[in-house]
Image: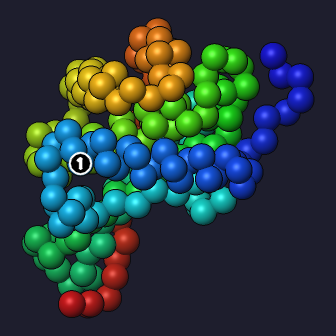
Amino acid sequence: MAGSTTPNEFDSPQLMTVTQAVCVAEELVSNFYKLSDSQLRQLNYDIKSASQLSPQEIVDDHFAQIVRYRAQKKDSVLGTDSKDYYLICLQDHAILDAVSRFKQLQLYPFMLYIVCHELIHIVRFRQFLQHFHVPSQERQIEEIRVHHVTREILRKSCTDDMDPVLDFYGKWQEAFDQMHEIVDDIDNEE
Ligand SMILES: [Zn+2]
């Protein structure tokens, strides 16, 4: 129901909830994969919400998307000199819309699910368990795997109000996230 229009961005109390969920999600995922602090840093990612996103990082119909940024030296022929980092782009509008439509969904456990899920993707990319670019069928299989691991981590997390979130994803397994890549040319920079 579209009674009042859903806001496009998290307000400050919501942003505090999101930040808290991000911290806990990082801890849960790094514990699950037994990542040390330095391994966690080497994942080389960042998480941003709507107010920090550029138009091309905003998508409809997804709660988050991962953009892989590749910084490549202009004179590099082989492409071996590229560094990449992953940006998890939270789609505030889609998240707030779901929270307003599905009353049983609370923002904190919902964000915990979303961020854990995206972090698991990134760990799997970094550990070469999954390539970033794959045919859509393979991507769907990967999505199912990642949802499965997310559930496993969160079921054990004893988070309040997590069951409705797991139910939601049980029914909405097709809620795949979007991924795309932006290549930035940078001048030589050691
Ligand atoms: Zn996913």
Coloration of the structure image: rainbow
Q: How many marks?
A: 1
Q: Nearer the viewer, residue 58 or 127?
A: 127
- Tell me if I can see residue 20 in this picture: yes
Q: Give the quarter of the image for residue 80.
A: bottom left
Residue toward you, 179 or 146: 146
* Whole-percent x, y for residue 161 in the image: 53, 22
Tell me where residue 111 appears, x and y as whole percent: 51, 37
Measured as percent of width and height from the top left, residue 136 is found at: 29, 27
Q: Is ligand 1 less than 8 Å from the beta carbon at label 1?
A: no
Q: Estimate the x, y position of residue 57 in percent, counting from the top left.
A: 53, 53
Quadrant in the picture for residue 33: top left
Q: As drawn, is 128 to the left or to the right of 163? A: left
Residue found at x 61% / y 34%: 107
Nearer the observer, 14 or 43:
14
Query: Is residue 172 visible in the rendered structure shown here?
Result: no
Identify the residue position indicated by label 1 in the image: 30
Residue at the (15%, 76%) spot, across then down: 81
**Amino acid under disc 1:** Ser
Q: Relative to 67, is 179 above or below?
A: above
- The quarter of the image holding the C terminus is bottom left
Going 63% across and 52% down the picture, which residue do you hit? Answer: 15
Question: With 8 as the anchor, is 124 left or right in this view?
Answer: left
Q: Quadrant of the N terminus?
A: top right
